[in-house]
Image (cartoon, rainbow, N blue to C red):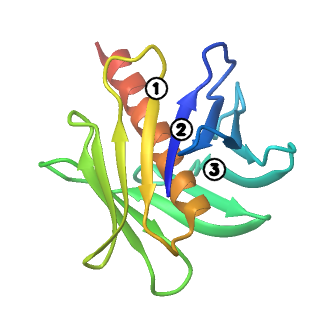
Amino acid sequence: MRYLIKERFFRLGEDSDITDESGRTVLHVDGKVLTLRDLLVIRDPAGQEIARVHRKLIALRPTYEISVGGREAAEVRKHFFTPFGDRFTIDVPGPDDLEMSGNLFDHEFTIRRGDQTVATVSKRWLTIRDTYSVETAPGEDDLLILASVLALDLAEDREREQEDERR
């Protein structure tokens, strides 16, 4: 299944819409402004909360928790040292952890479980608002994958802000 995650043009916080390949809105992302934890609330089209993504306050590396239906579904952690691109572990309860790797400069990421590709992610260049294209393999947990891409975006935004502050 192919999805587009588009930041809203007029927005307060990290608000986005997620559409399917036919252009129908399937999820809304409500970025809570002025929070320490970079909180995103994912809602269905009726406005019901179905998932949350938030930054863990005390962690040695960028870490984001994903909860679905009030239960922890995954933890997304950026690897410390990755000289040839960015790498994240999507730690899910049980043995089926995922690895997200790619390069922010190329705007291409792959999500894998072992040697199997479960999703590909592309960020569009030269757009007024951030847009990610996410293609998931059949039978995968699309909500978990989309929430992981949102965590990736939060981590990259935070990293850019820190670099800007150092300059």
Residue 113, position as x, y percentages in the image: 35, 75
* Kind of residue at badge 2: Ile
For the question of whether residue 20 can be seen, the reply is: yes
Residue 130: give its label. 1
Cα distance, mark 1 to mark 3?
Answer: 18 Å
Which residue position holds label 2?
5
Q: Residues within 10 Å of mark 1 (few under 14, many from 20)?
A: some
The answer to whether residue 90 is above or below residue 128 is: below
- Regarding mark 1 in the picture, which secondary structure is present there? loop
- Regarding mark 2 in the picture, which secondary structure is present there? strand
Residue 51: quarter of image: bottom right
Residue 166: quarter of image: top left
Which residue: 21% across, 53% down? Answer: 81
Q: Residue furthest front?
A: 22
Cα distance, mark 2 to mark 1?
Answer: 8 Å
Residue 152, position as x, y percentages in the image: 44, 45
The answer to whether residue 117 is above or below residue 96 is: above
